[in-house]
Amino acid sequence: MTEDSIDRIVHEWNRERPDLDVSPTHVLQRITRLYLLQSASFAEVFGRYGLSFGEYEVLAALTRSGPPHRMKPSELVGALVLSSGAMTNRIDRVEEAGLVERLPDPDDRRATLVALTDKGRHVVDEAVIAHLANEERLLGGLTTGERRQLAGLLRKLLTSEPFMMLDPARSAADNGRVAGQATRARRMRRR
C-alpha cells in the first residue's frame, strides 16, 4: 500500500513522542485532508455555474422538495443545518442572481416562501449533473463494495455518541425535546 502524508505525520509523532497513541490521526487527519481536497474540487465545479457549494445546496434542497419547489426559510435552515443568519445570506445571494424568489406564504401573512425560479431550476439541473460526475471521479479509486463499506463505516462514526453530541441538528432537536420535558414537568407540579 502506498504511504501518504498522514503516514509521515504519524511516523514523526511516533518517533518524537513514542509515549503517545497517535493512531486516531490515521483516520481523522485523512478525513480532514479528503474534506479539504473535496471542497476545492466542489468549488471548481460549482464556480462554472456562478455558485458556491452553499448556494448550490439551497437550490438542491428546493429541487428535492418537489413541485412547486418552495420552502419556508426555516425549513431550509433545518434541511441544511445552518443558522438563520447564514441561510438569509445564502438566500439573498441566490435571489440576487435570479435563481430564487421570495413569495408571500398563503398560509401565513407574516411569512415568506423561497421558490426556485425557472433560471434556478435550469442552473441546478446542469450543476447536479456536473457535481455527480465529479463525485464519481473522486471516488473512482474505490470499488462499489469498498464504497458501500466506507459509507457504512462513516455512517457508524457520524451516528456515534461523540459526533452526535457535536451535531447542531441533533442539538436543536434535543433542545426541543428537553424544553418539552421541562414544560410537562411544570404541568405535573401544578397538578
Image (cartoon, rainbow, N blue to C red):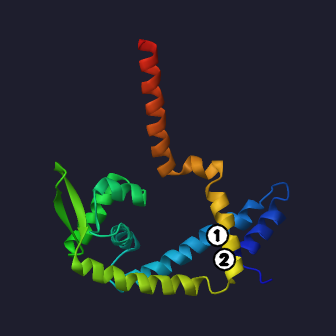
The location of residue 164, given as percent across then percent down, is 58, 50
Which secondary structure, mark 1? Answer: helix
**Label 2 Cα crowd, 10 Å radius (few <14 / some 14-19 / many 20+):** some
**Numbered tag placed on residue 85 in the rendering:** none
Residue that carries the numbered disc 2 in the rendered image: 147
Q: Residue at x 58, y 83 (%)?
A: 138
Regarding residue 23, the answer to whether it shows in the image is yes
Percent x, y of residue 174: 50, 41
Count of marks, rendered view: 2
Q: CA distance from mark 1 to mark 2?
A: 6 Å
Q: Position of residue 186 (x, y in %)?
A: 43, 19
Q: Residue furthest top?
A: 191
Q: Are marks 1 and 2 in contact (CB under 8 Å)?
A: yes
**Residue in the picture at 65% in, 64% down:** 154
Q: Which residue in the structure is indicated by mark 1? A: 151
**Residue that appears at 32% across and 53% down:** 74
Q: State which quadrant residue 100 falls in.
A: bottom left
- Amino acid type at circle 2 is Arg
Q: Would you say residue 50 is visible in this rendering?
A: no
For residue 24, side relative to residue 131 (left or right)? right
Quadrant showing the N terminus: bottom right
Residue 152 place in picture, x, y as percent: 67, 66
At label 1, the amino acid type is Ala
Quarter occupied by the C terminus: top left
**Secondary structure of residue under mark 2:** helix
Q: Nearer the viewer, residue 37 or 128?
A: 128
Q: Against 102, is 159 above or below?
A: above
Q: Residues within 10 Å of mark 1 (few under 14, many from 20)?
A: few
* Relative to 181, residue 105 above or below: below
The picture quadrant where one finds residue 126 is: bottom left
> Which of the pair 140/113 is nearer the observer?
113
